[in-house]
Image (tube, rainbow, N blue to C red):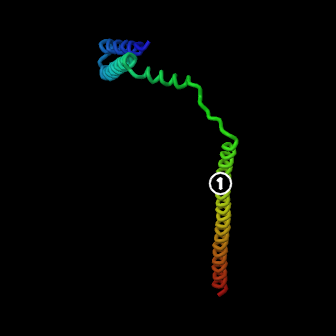
Amino acid sequence: MGHIPTITVSALAVVLSGLYFVLPETLHFTMIVFITAAWFLVAICWLAQKSADYMHKHGSGHEVKKKLTELSNRPSQTMPLSSDELHQARIQLMAELEELQDRVKIKDDEIEKLKAEIDNLKTLMQIEALKAELANLKMLTTKENSKRKTKKK
């Protein structure tokens, strides 16, 4: 089954090589590129198959699989825990949970403070914008007043 890719790619390379002589000269460069790539794939497939054959005959992959199946066939060894040990583990886990909850609460408080600061900055920006607009209006009224005074003279 492993030789099928090598045979298929070899057939493709042979067909492309034959087409080189049939197709017009304008396609020769393109065909050379395709033919070279096809024969390269043949070499790669052949080397991969040789490597797989060698590993199948001499490789340690079989031993690794054998060791893994031996380990998985063993009954799992669980140690029974006493109620005191379970209670200790529960207390420890509860302490860790409380510590995490405190950290989250601190982070939430920091987030709320930052949101409040952002709101304050937005308000300050709005106040500054209103001040700038008021100053512009004052300047406009001053200009209009000065124009009226110059017209009356």
Is the residue marked by circle 1 packed among few (<14), some (14-19), or many (20+) residues within 10 Å? Answer: few
* Residue 24 percent location from the top left of the image: 31, 16
- In the rendered structure, the answer to whether residue 76 lies left or right of residue 48 reads right
> Considering the numbered disc 1 on the image, is that residue within a helix, a strand or a loop?
helix
- The one of 89 and 18 positioned closer to us in this rendering: 89
Point 66% across, 63% down: residue: 113
Q: Which residue is mark 1?
A: 99
Residue 118 occupies which quadrant of the picture?
A: bottom right
Q: Is residue 46 above or below residue 143?
A: above
Q: Based on the displayed image, in which of its 4 quarters is residue 51 positioned? A: top left
Residue 137 position in % (x across, y down): 66, 75
Horizontal and vertical percent for residue 84? 69, 44
**Position of residue 146 measured from the top left corner of the image (x, y, whole percent):** 64, 83
Q: Quadrant of residue 12?
A: top left
Q: Residue at x 68, y 42 (%)?
A: 86
Give the amino acid at mark 1: Glu
| Residue 45 visible to an observer of this rendering | no
Reply above or below: 151 against 71: below
Q: Is residue 70 visible?
A: yes
Marker count (numbered): 1
Q: Is residue 64 left or right of residue 46?
A: right
Q: Is residue 17 left or right of residue 73?
A: left
107 is higher (above) or lower (below) than 28: below
Quadrant of the image containing the N terminus:
top left
Residue placed furthest toward the bottom? 153
Placement of the C terminus among the 4 image quadrants? bottom right
What residue sits 62% from the left and 35% below the top?
Answer: 79
**Placement of 117 over or under 43, stated as above or below:** below
